[in-house]
Amino acid sequence: MPSGQTHDRITLWSLPVVTGLTIASTQSGNLALIVSGGFLFSGLMLSPDLDLKSLPFKRWGWLRWIWIPYQKAMRHRSIFSHGPLIGTTLRMLYLATWTALVGILILGVVQLFRDVPWSWQQFGEDIKQWLINYQAEWIALFVGLELGAMIHSVSDWTSTALKRSQRKPKRKSTTRKRTPSRRTSKK
């Protein structure tokens, strides 16, 4: 399995390719920036290796504690952490849940000190409208995040396959070793 630094190098060396292919396929600098940013964020911060005390885990600094329940729930290299689509989706939902909890807490505290009327229902509608209006951007972000996770997983799988192919298979012996039998003779 590649080290954290190797994963970082793979991400950084792949970034221009991802950016170029995105620009060529979408003809949009904005979407290319979102895909590339998602790719970089996924490779360096939202890595499948957040299920370990890894380099991406340490990069979260004093916020790394939010990933400890995730680590306890995930088995390393399981389909839920390293699997295509599933791993990225779960990490995004996990991070979104923390973000929503903190956001609601902050909004609640701010609301205590405001005299302006507030409606949670209107806030929910605004969020829903925002998600719909920026649908292409959200898809581009998910594609970037998934590409960053996939390049990580593919490098893990490739490294493991290479190591297995380089091992010499153990030969099974077809002949049994004979041990001399000790016969005791009675006289």
Image (tube, rainbow, N blue to C red):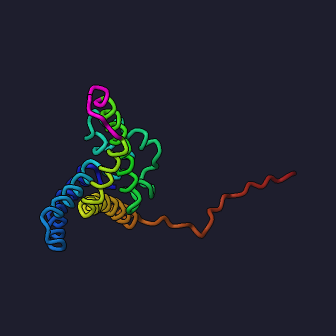
Instruction: Identify the residue at image location x=25%, y=41%.
Output: 59
Horizontally, is 23 left or right of 138 in the view? left
Percent from the top left, x then y, of residue 156? 34, 59
Query: Residue 139's image quarter?
Result: bottom left
Horizontally, is 123 left or right of 39 in the view? right
Percent from the top left, x then y, of residue 158? 33, 64
**Residue 118 within the segment the image draws in magenta:** yes
Percent from the top left, x then y, of residue 34? 19, 58
Prevailing secondary structure class for the magenta stretch in the rendered image = loop
Instruction: Identify the residue at image location x=26%, y=54%.
Output: 43
Horizontally, is 126 left or right of 76 in the view? left
Percent from the top left, x then y, of residue 163? 36, 62
Q: Nearer the viewer, residue 105 or 166?
A: 105
The quadrant the N terminus occupies is: bottom left
Query: Residue 172's image quarter?
Result: bottom right
Query: Residue 25's image quarter?
Result: bottom left
Q: Nearer the viewer, residue 57 or 26?
A: 26
Q: Residue furthest left?
A: 29
Q: Which residues are magenta?
A: 110-119
Does residue 148 appear in this view?
A: no
Q: Residue furthest top?
A: 113
Q: Nearer the viewer, residue 166 or 106?
A: 106
Measured along the vertical axis of the image, is residue 167 above or below residue 123?
below
